[in-house]
Image: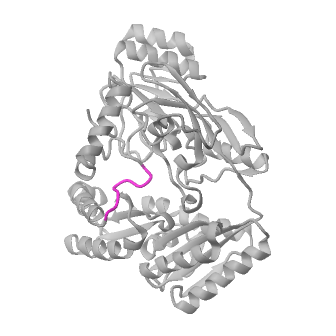
Amino acid sequence: MNDLISQLRGAVGAAHVLTDGDLSAWETDWRKRSRGKALAVVRPGSTQEVAAVMRACAAAGTPVVPQGGNTGLVVGGVPDESGREVVLSLTRLNRVRAIDRDNLTLTVDAGCVLQNLQQAAEEAGLLFPLSLAAEGSCTIGGNLATNAGGTQVVRYGNTRELCLGLEVVTAQGEVWDGLTGLRKDNTGYDLRDLFIGSEGTLGVITGATMKLYPRPAATLTAWAAVPSMEAAVTLLGLAHRHLGAGLTGFEVMGQFALSLVAKHYPQLRVPLHESVPYCVLLENADQESEEHARSVFERLLEVALEDGCAADAVVAENLGQAHQLWHIREAIPLAQAEEGLNIKHDISIPVSRIPAFCADTDGLLRREIPGVRLVNFGHLGDGNLHYNVQAPEGGDMKAFLNANEERVNTLVYEQVKRFDGSISAEHGIGLLKAGKLPDYKSPVALGMMRALKRALDPGNILNPGRVVHI
């Protein structure tokens, strides 16, 4: 291994090959559920340096774990405990390479922090719409590798839909330059889509060309109290009809989830949540004017109140109020953590079946585990729920997880399967769910996935054991 370390130092510079000292920032996952041990943390500064690292590791048969901002939630971007895996940190690849205003595209290094992409687009008078709670830390390469979702999928789609081209280093250390800005290119297999969502198991994304959009003339936010999940789905249908493409966000939040925010962050002043089971956060981006946006928004809410699918509603009067409402939504995971350890689920269900799923699964869990508390919130507009399970109040949280996590996961995932859903909506599979995937993915699909893995990474050195086992 000394020879490999020497080669890596020659490829990227000795200062960027870390083997000693505190490496916990690269070895511990975002949720602090897993702490591995890296052979080395290597920090290349260019695509060619990434290629040199991959060639050296391929020759040595040494596994490589690509890592962006290390904000993943399924233990997919940190090393295992063997001490054999090299962590390939891409955060030094952080340039905005080009902005093409006429083509509405932005080409960037994979290590660019998402918030910096948003800012670069804004400075060009345009919009990059991907928005996540971790946007100040996560990188676009990681967003692409996991096909991240976020709060505006209902209008703009997942990260996959925002990407036109990629630059990728293969497991053998070759560079594929697919950084096209074309929206139409039918010249064979779409290689780009192989790597998006592959979680670093098929290649290392080093650059990307992303779509930009005109900035809306006005963006307004509303908060509605709804009497049931059925009412929330009805309100979503009304929002589609009244706002059309202007509907850029539709988030649902359960009463208990909001009560945790009120308990742990009282300064946020959560509105309208105490008397209804759910609240909804809506966003309307209008290309005409603020007056037009407010007019159609207020008409939507009038109809919702008349129809009974909303019990009460408010429209933010200014940008500060809108930020406050979004801050409440984004504080739910933080409030959960303050309350104690919990069992997380990132699931998707056809929107039309979400009310029945919630009613059935809520009842099932409460029967099976008396006192269990359900933290249900997420992106109802695209069918993605963060359906989390908190221990009974006053209990030993760690003991609850140890005794019930596997059982709860099985109960929830079987319900997801029954309702034609997915056990991973936007977080990916990683190591955390790799063992569960064969139970919820067809054998034919798994066979094709394994065939792709063997073809592109025959030595199984790229993120081995994550996503799919071969």
In the displayed structure image, the side of residue 142 where residue 363 appears, left or right: left
- Foreground residue, 317 or 399? 317
Quadrant assignment for the N terminus: top left
In the displayed structure image, the side of residue 166 where residue 128 appears, left or right: right
Q: Classify residue 324 by image quadrant.
A: bottom right
Q: Give the residue at x 49% y 71%.
A: 252
Question: Residue 469's spot in the image, x, y percent?
Answer: 27, 36
Give the tally of numbered discs: 0
Q: In this view, does 189 lie above or below 442?
A: above
Q: Is residue 1 above or below residue 74?
A: above
Question: Residue 284's spot in the image, x, y percent?
Answer: 66, 69
Q: Is residue 30 above or below residue 24?
A: below
Question: Residue 145's spot in the image, x, y percent?
Answer: 48, 40
Per the rendered image, the range of residues in magenta is 420-427
Q: Is residue 445 above or below residue 15?
A: below
Residue 325: tell me if it is visible.
yes
Question: Residue 353's spot in the image, x, y percent?
Answer: 37, 72
In the displayed structure image, the side of residue 241 where residue 363 appears, left or right: left
Q: Classify residue 223 by image quadrant.
A: bottom right
Name the image colouring: one colour
Quadrant assignment for the C terminus: top left
In the displayed structure image, the side of residue 127 where residue 333 appears, left or right: left
The answer to if 426 sits in the magenta stretch is: yes
Residue 80: tell me if it is visible.
no
Q: Give the residue at x 56% y 75%.
A: 270
Q: Give the residue at x 67% y 32%.
A: 95
Residue at the front extreme?
A: 187
- Foreground residue, 219 or 168? 168
Q: Main secondary structure of the magenta part?
A: loop
The answer to if 234 sits in the magenta stretch is: no
